[in-house]
Image (cartoon, helix red, strand yellow):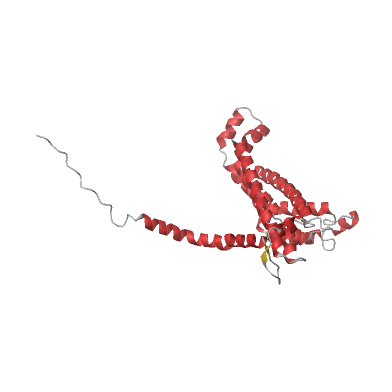
Amino acid sequence: MSVTAPTRPPQTPPRGRARPRGRHGLLGWLYATPTAVFVVALFVVPLGLVVKMSVSRWPLLTGDQGFNAPDNFDKAVNHRFFTDSVVFTVKYTVLATVLLLVLGLGLALLVQESSRWNNLLRASFLIPSALGLASASLLFYVFYSPFASPLKPLMDSWGFTFLGSPTAALLSTTFLIVWRYAGFYMVLMLVGLQGIPADVFEAARSDGATRWQTFWRVTLPLLRPTLALTTVLCVTGSLLAFEQFYILTKGGPDNSTITVVQLIYSVAFQGQNDLGVAAAISVIVLLALILINALQLRAFRSEES
């Protein structure tokens, strides 16, 4: 006599819980549609228009339009201020990046421990970041002015002006940027420092490591992802510098502080009124930014590995 085990009837999923996969996909597309429209309208379409303008005759006001590649790129590279603007932008980028990263990390290490005094310092360092860059530039324009500056007596007695020479203009503008953004980079560094486990530092101290050894061999290696992010942000922002130099120096003295973005603005809306050449310079800057950021990320990844 054989006994068969009773079979369980197939269970049906409760109603109201199971949803078809197609409905999930439709909901996903609905959620992503606003962001996709935003990206396409404000990034993809303008980027395509800039690329089209860079290979076409595109006067600002009147004139014939048509394909003329690669004339715009030849005019862009051979512009009388192109090389000087690139050299100055790179010089400013190196100076601003080094100062911001060093000062941001130093401030983060200074206020790393949580206390009332450190919380007050954090807020004090971060306050300038709440001020717009154009507003901060106008504020420093008055501060640097030889007529309205509160330091006018010292400037008259020493015969010194903050914006009177190429070196002074570069250093004065860099000081503005460091004052404006040091607190922002301090916050980024502070987040990275607080993400390092405390057990690592305790193990280093138990092994007899000094503060410098702990900083060099423990803190910096574990802070490398944060350093990569801050370096990319700082380099990108410095290469695209415009407001501070346009308000403080307007490219002077003697066209010595013209950045690449200033050159784009000048070619498009001042003098030549040629949007095609300006778009060609913009495409060159975009390709340079992509290459530089890729090299930076690759360098940080190779060091980490």
Q: Quadrant of residue 194?
A: top right
Q: Within the image, what quadrant is residue 81 found in? A: bottom right
Placement of the N terminus among the 4 image quadrants: top left
Q: Nearer the viewer, residue 207 or 263?
A: 263
Residue at the far bottom: name it: 62
State which quadrant residue 106 falls in: top right
- Which residue appears at 60% of the width and 60% of the height? 48
Residue at image coords 76%, 49%: 91
Q: In the drawing, does residue 99 fall left or right of residue 165?
A: left
Q: Nearer the viewer, residue 60 or 211?
A: 60
Q: Is residue 111 visible?
A: no
Residue found at the very far top of the displayed protein: 207
Q: Nearer the viewer, residue 149 or 96?
A: 96
Please report the residue visible at 61 percent of the width from the left and 37 percent of the height from the top: 302
* Percent x, y of residue 207: 61, 27
Q: Would you say residue 176 is visible in this rendering?
A: yes
**Residue 33 x, y percent position in the rendering:** 48, 61
| Position of the C terminus by quadrant | top right
Q: Residue 108, how many percent across, how many down?
A: 65, 45
Measuring from the top left, give residue 202's x and y in whole percent: 58, 33
